Image (cartoon, helix red, strand yellow):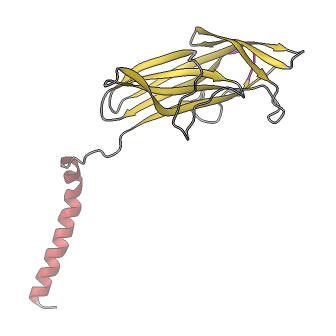
Amino acid sequence: MNLSERRILFVVVSGILILLVASPALSRLLIFPRTEFFTEFWILDSNHGTRDYPFNVTLTRDYNVFLGIANRLGYCAYYSVEVKFRNQTQSAPSRFNHTSSSLPALCNISAFVADQGVLEQPLTLSFVYQYNESLSRVELRSLELNGVESNLNNTTIDWDLKENGFRGVLFFELWIYNGTSSSFQYHDRFLSLRLNMTV
């Protein structure tokens, strides 16, 4: 290897070492633009996990979950979560059509969440219902969510032969405030808890 080849090798190796040493410092100076803007939305069980969601619901017993929202939209957002309950035949939100359920909200949970902020709300829920043996159906009376009672009158759940139980769904639709239209719009996200009302 002659002297000029050694110089080239020395310059290349030195350049690579300088880049490796300087890369952590350069990454702090360079600001890359954000390219993804979205909202995270989740439900966790009472242990902050995903294994122990309430399923077999008993009369007037309390069940605990955590509802979470993380704002990655690039601005402070005003969210509203509509809490709804449906039986096997009632309207559900549609992922395919990007539409919310036509059922009325039992209650709303509203909050401002800063950009890159996270809101996690503990929820305690319980149901009051009655079993109508002659019709083989459960007649729901109310849902209590964090101490606030919502009327569920006129909601009934018939025995589901396929599922072998009285199955209902408590679900949470995410809505976001649109300043242009001065109204909340469905944010195309919903979460659900499938429940079996035991008798």
Tell me where residue 7 appears, x and y as whole percent: 11, 81
Is residue 60 found left or right of 38 in the rendered image? Answer: right
Residue at image position (50%, 33%) is 189
Is residue 68 found left or right of 23 in the rendered image? Answer: right
Residue at image position (23%, 51%) is 27
Give residue 49's quadrant in the image. Answer: top right
Is residue 160 found left or right of 98 in the rendered image? Answer: right
Q: Quadrant of the N terminus?
A: bottom left
Tell me where residue 4 appears, x and y as whole percent: 9, 86
Look at the picture and state if 44 lies above or below 197.
below
Tell me where residue 91 appears, x and y as whole percent: 63, 27
- Please tell me how many numbered marks the rendered image carries: 0
Residue 99 part of the magenta-drawn span: no
Tell me where residue 97 appears, x and y as whole percent: 54, 38
List the single residue furthest toward the right.
134
Residue at image position (24%, 53%) is 24
| Chain part drawn in magenta | 57-61
Which secondary structure class fits the magenta region best? loop
Residue at image position (55%, 30%) is 43
Give residue 51's quadrant in the image. Answer: top right
Q: Quadrant of the C terminus?
A: top right
Look at the picture and state if 61 lies above or below 65.
above
Give residue 102's quadrant in the image. Answer: top right
